[in-house]
Amino acid sequence: MNRLSGKVAIITGGARGMGATHVRMLVGEGAKVVFTDLNEEGGLALAQELGENVKFVKQDVTNAADWETVINETENTFGPVNILVNNAGISMNKTIAEMTEAEYRKILEINQVSVFLGMKAVLPSMQKTGNGSIINISSMNGIVGGAIGYTDTKFAVRGMSKAAALQFGPLGIRVNSVHPGVIETPMVTEGDAVEVIKEFSKHIPMRRIAKPEEVSNLVLFLASDESSYSTGSEFIIDGGLTAQ
Ligand code: NAD
């Protein structure tokens, strides 16, 4: 119940999918949480449901000025930030031949540049307490190849997490990446969920895709002091997919 009591967290992309589950579970363990998203309607509804320890701020994660607003709102509402979960992201399933330059730059901005902006913006706030945990959501496609653009950004997130861990370690701030396999969220089930799940499951050693809560449990561990000596590491949660 209180694994995160006294901690202040920011979670991006929290209006739906895994981000929303991270918000619910971190609050459930006593954290005070600001979560952000482009989806204002979904964000406000979730914030209203979860009550006074949660605040929604509309944010485009690719926008540096929005990041400043989010950090200021968080500090003014709950105090200095201890936990940042860079979760917002998009997928794109096109070949190199099909993908336009604009689409390629768009996925780099949302999945990769946003993580740089988030880590840069949160640093002064985390330094105030000298106790920070940054959790960057990559993918199994940050370990093995998949779609062009998506794979590129998720490998980058893994590398950026290590580079930041080296810089931030002496400051008491840990940085790790999380690498989910196939998780039951709108990102993968939009369209025909039942068929998508059946098709994916055939290729997974555990023969099922995961519930978002299973990833949130890992995020919780990394957010808490239980993971106090883990930094610069990748945490794979994929039912054995990349072990093949
Ligand atoms: P989702 O599409 O359900 O949710 C993503 C959220 O991010 C949405 O609410 C969306 O509005 C928000 N978002 C998108 N662009 C944004 C922007 N510019 N600014 C602010 N918010 C923005 O996705 P999900 O499946 O919950 O994925 C969450 C993260 O996990 C992503 O980084 C994704 O790449 C990663 N991931 C997902 C899976 C999976 O199987 N679902 C697997 C591996 C990694």
Image: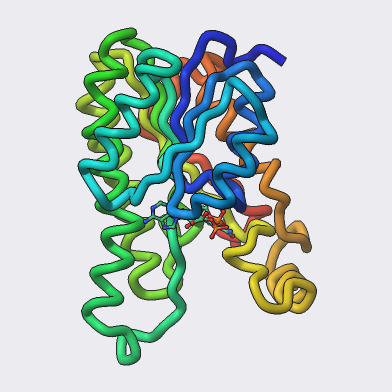
On screen, residue 230 versus residue 52, left or right, reads left
Quadrant assignment, res 28: top right
Against 101, residue 60 (above or below) is above
Quadrant assignment, res 230: top left
Residue at 30%, 76% in the rendered image: 103
Count the labels in the image. 0
Residue at 42%, 68% in the rendered image: 145
On screen, residue 9 versus residue 98, left or right, reads right
The figure's colour scheme reads: rainbow
Residue 240 seen in render: yes
Quadrant assignment, res 21: top right
Residue at 36%, 26% in the rendered image: 73
On screen, residue 144 versus residue 30, left or right, reads left
Instruction: Give the residue at the far bottom of this rendering.
Output: 97
Q: In the rendering, at what x and y percent does residue 48 appear?
A: 64, 35
Q: In the rendering, at what x and y percent does residue 96 appear?
A: 31, 85
Residue sitting nearer the eye, 44 or 236: 44
Residue 243 seen in render: no
